Amino acid sequence: MAGPSFFGKRAQETTGVTAGLLDSSTVKAPPRWLAMEEPMAEDRAARIMELYDREALILYRLAYRITGSREDARDAVQESFARLVQHKDLDSLVRPESWLRTVITRLSIDLRRRRNADADRKRERALELMALDETDRANTGDVALERKEKVAALRRGIEQLSAIDRAILLRRSLDDVPLAELADAYGVTEKAVRNRLSRARIFLRQRMKREEG
């Protein structure tokens, strides 16, 4: 039986493209699954390392296409091989590379869903804060329904802005994009961006006051 020493030795040997495929820094920091301490037969460990050398880059590219995130793709590759290490009947896998691709596809879809859900919650909260004036923010007793109504009114107002004003307002307010970057993206000056932001915010405040009145 070969314990962690096999993976420790193999990790030091893995200094080529495969070791660094996820990030150049991983050459000095081998994948986390290499540090797993479950003893296993040396031939089993060698088979897993051979699969990693052959499939890791393919799996990374597959995960990246699904997630659009290098970090998530790296995590998906590592988790896939961690699950392979823990598989109780590895010898029964006729095509372990197909098994790995199925696992990483599911993991990547889950990661993308979680990331999208987190982004949606962040944007919804940002819209909520935009809809509340300073008094509302200080009042922790606000009723949830009132906040939803304010957000709905804000959305209706935003829809009435011109396409460029709407894009500038949302990218600045929700994503905190720098003024210079916005100016470059829309082919205007930073002063023009500030003016558009000011006009859009005044319009939204006035429209929301009319709806409340």
Image (cartoon, grey):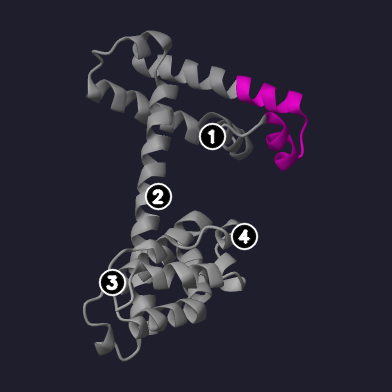
The residue segment tinted magenta is 179-198
Q: What residue sits right under mark 1 in the picture? A: 170
Q: Secondary structure at mark 4?
A: helix
Locate residue 4, reporting x and y percent.
Answer: 36, 67
Q: Which mark is residue 127?
A: none
Please report the residue visible at 74 percent of the width from the left and 27 percent of the height from the top.
190
Q: CA distance from mark 1 to mark 3?
A: 53 Å
Q: Is residue 99 above or below residue 17?
A: below
Residue 107 shown in magenta: no
Q: Is the stretch drawn in magenta largely helix, strand or loop?
A: helix
56 or 178: nearer the eye? 56
Q: Is residue 109 left or right of residue 22?
A: left
Neighbour class for label 1 at 10 Å: few (<14), some, many (≥20)?
some
Q: Which residue is mark 3?
A: 39
Q: Residue 203: x and y, percent?
A: 54, 20
Q: Which residue is mark 4?
A: 24
Give the position of the N terminus as an image quadrant: bottom left
Label 4 crowd bin: few (<14), some (14–19), many (20+), radius 10 Å: few
Whichever of callouts 2 and 1 sits on the residue coming sooner in the sequence is: 2
Q: Which mark is residue 115?
A: 2
Instruction: Specify the amino acid type for callout 3.
Output: Pro
Residue 62 in view here:
no
N-terminal of the pair, mark 2 or mark 4, is: 4
In this image, 160 relative to 105: left or right? right
Please name the residue shown 58% across and 59% down the image.
23
Which three-letter amino acid code belongs to the residue tagged 2?
Answer: Arg
